[in-house]
Amino acid sequence: MAGITPRWLLRRLPWERADAGTYRVNRRLTYQLGDGLVSFVNDGATVRAVPPELAELPPLRGFADTTLLDAVAGRFVQREYEPGDTIAEAGRPADAVHLIAHGKVEVTEPGEYGAAARVDILADGRFFGDRALHGPGGEWPSTYRAITPTIVLTLPGEAIEELTGRYEALRVHLERHRDAPVPPQTRHGEAAIEVAAGHDGEPVLPGTFVDYEASPREYELSVTQTLLRVHTRVADLYNDPMNQVEQQLRLTIEEICERQEHELINNRSFGLLHNADLRQRIQTRGGPPTPADMDELLARRRKTRFFLAHPKTIAAFGRECTRLGLYPASVEVDGQRVQAWRGVPIHPCDKIPISPTGTSSIIAMRTGVDDQGVIGLHRTGIPNEVRPGLSVRFTGIDDKAIMSYLVSAYYSAAVLVPDALGVLENVEIAR
């Protein structure tokens, strides 16, 4: 069977038992609403922001008047930038809101020795300058420059003044947001826990409590099933020297496991590519996967256990290392030598998709309950279990003398803390 792969994800992922078919992840409350991205629609070359999506901008969060959001969306002006064009420059007045409809934007700040230092890369759906909705004042702290051909929707300061002057409800909402106290937060955006340290004597200690999310996510086990049908004649006459039913079941189980790994990566409900926090999705600096990109991915979390990448992506990373004169070392995992970067193994996984334009993704993760990482979920102890979470049940013989076996695998995956999982997106592998 040519379709059998090493299935590194299934091997390296710690598995936890999910009783009753669900697994609840209780997290500390994080002050973040929505997905943080603005959606767009286009009619030919004309791009428009979806009005309700403007509530993703912090000053407009909670504003439910769709008529006014329509008016705000209608005042955005579409602008197009070529690679290298400056959208906003540090030190200039911050008097506009910019929405990135398409493309990549580099964010730089003055470095310690005069050179520009790149601090971030923004892509489709991101925005900056939303504080301009509070009125004029302030300067751009960073320079925003297009890396690729970029379409930006801009709300100029004049339009903001006109909208707040015409619509009283909008002006009141923006003023309320501007004057609202900011709840204490950690640098990760979680509700702060007040503690005292380094004190003398008998001061009054601060009172605190750990605030959790009110509606924690519950992961339900998914299932992959198939019905293996074997004629009794095969089992009766051709089971020597090889057991035909056993071999049929073995290959069926292999295919079930291949599909299981595919779903753990690509499923829109619990797949790793879709469950990575948006703040943990980063863009490549120039297209191909470079050592600098891998370092940036590593720096987003502690205790990264391994990378997952398509074999062609690993080859592209190797070409970039060769071009720079670098020769990454390998490490031994389960008795096998595996290519690594900074001591972290890079496991091949052909389940990670490659887009028609020749781009893919690289996944990095911390694993295990003790490290608050990524875990696999299954239900052990089910009837007729042949592997943990996988069962083979004989369902009978029909009137055509055909035996049937129901092969079922129950599984899912959970991300315990957002920074446990990171993805390097839009990795160019064709160059």
Image (cartoon, rainbow, N blue to C red):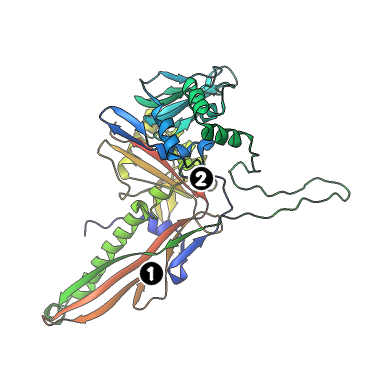
Q: Which residue is drawn at 38% across and 76% down?
A: 382
Q: In this view, does 397 lie above or below 267?
A: below
**Quadrant of res 54:** top left
Q: Pointer 1: what residue?
A: 389
Q: In this view, does 230 lie to the left or right of 21?
A: left
Which of 86/72 is in front? 72
Which of 226/52 is in front? 52
Which of 421/122 is in front? 122
Q: Which residue is drawn at 30% across and 41% down?
A: 312
Residue 417 x, y percent position in the rendering: 53, 52
Nearer the observer: mark 1 or 2; the answer is 2
First along the sequence among labels 1 and 2? 2
Q: Which residue is drawn at 47% across and 42% down?
A: 64
Image disc number at residue 33? 2
Q: Which amino acid does label 2 sit on?
A: Leu
Residue 18 x, y percent position in the rendering: 46, 67
**Quadrant location of the C terminus?**
top left
Residue 325 x, y percent position in the rendering: 41, 29
- Please rate how many residues cluster around mark 1, counting C-alpha atoms within 10 Å: few if below 14, some from 14 to 19, many from 20: some
Q: In this view, does 403 lie to the left or right of 199?
A: left
Q: Is mark 2 on a helix, strand or loop?
A: loop
Q: In this view, does 297 lie to the left or right of 269?
A: right
Q: Is residue 52 above or below residue 366?
A: above
Q: In this view, does 426 lie to the left or right of 301?
A: left
Q: What residue type is labelled 1?
A: Gly
